[in-house]
Amino acid sequence: MTAIAQQQLHFLPITRKIPGSFAIWAAILAEMTEFAVMFMVYFLAKVHNPVLFYEGPTRLNTTAGTANTLIMLTSSFFVVRAVMAMRENQRQICVRWLWAAVSCGVLYLVIKYFEYQWNTAQGLHTETNIFYGVYYYVTFNHFLHVGWGTAAIVWVIYQINTGIYTKDEHEGLINIALYWHMIDLAWITIFPLLYVIR
């Protein structure tokens, strides 16, 4: 290669593709907008009901909330490892990481279910006051997203096991990984707002 050709290659623009499809980014934007509206409702309600929002977190099961935070962070790590394994053409290892993420998703749902049962036993309902109304609305919405995301990961596992997703073609895996990280990010915001901040 001549020196001139090397110089021309040096000045060629480097194109970087954003991971995932346009559709998943549109979905993530829509979901994040939904959560942003919920957080705005939270802050407006807190401004008008400071005492209820100060006392509310003290009656929640912080242990369950903390456990689910650790579970969500761990599940995101598993999803990242799955993507890395697929890029290295280690499909079975990828599947194992994804099953680990599914286990985290199921564990999150189980803990949240029993947390709701515990709340009910303590007399904490949506009608108790506005703090618990906001708490149930936000956390149940997130609960549904975790359920959908977990089911989507199982679908990705099926796609990998049937050979539809390969090292060179696995955009669906990337899409679900991005969606799962969005769910994780939402919970990382929800946890301190509802369980920690007074």
Image (tube, rainbow, N blue to C red):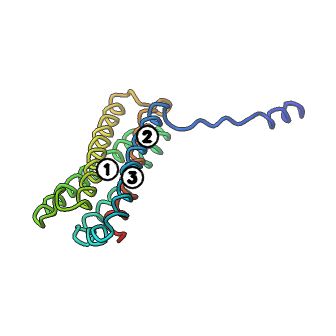
Spatial CA distance of label 3 from label 2 is 11 Å
Whether label 3 touches label 2, CB < 8 Å: no
Residue beneath label 2, please? Answer: 28
On screen, residue 79 versus residue 5, left or right, reads: left
Q: Secondary structure at mark 3?
A: helix
Asked if residue 57 shows in the view, the reply is yes
Q: Which residue is mark 3?
A: 186
Q: Amino acid at mark 3?
A: Ala
Residue receiving disc 1: 100
Q: Residues within 10 Å of mark 1 (few under 14, many from 20)?
A: some
Task: Indicate which disc residue 36 carries.
Answer: none
Identify the residue at image location x=38%, y=59%: 43
Callout 3 crowding tier (Cα within 10 Å): few <14, some 14–19, many ≥20: some
Q: Position of residue 93 (x, y in %)?
A: 38, 44
Above or below — where is 79 with respect to 195?
above
In this view of the protein, which residue sits in the foreground, 114 or 125? 125
Q: Amino acid at mark 2?
A: Ile
Distance, label 1 to label 2, CA atoms, is 23 Å
**Disc 1 residue type?**
Ala
**Mark 2: few/some/many CA within 10 Å (<14, 14-19, 20+):** some
Secondary element type, mark 2: helix
Q: Residue at x 31, y 33 (%)?
A: 158
Question: Which type of secondary structure does the marked residue at label 1 adopt?
Answer: helix
* Mark found first going from the N terminus, 1 or 3: 1
State which tag comes first along the sequence, 1 or 2.
2
| Residue at point 13%, 59% (across, down) | 117
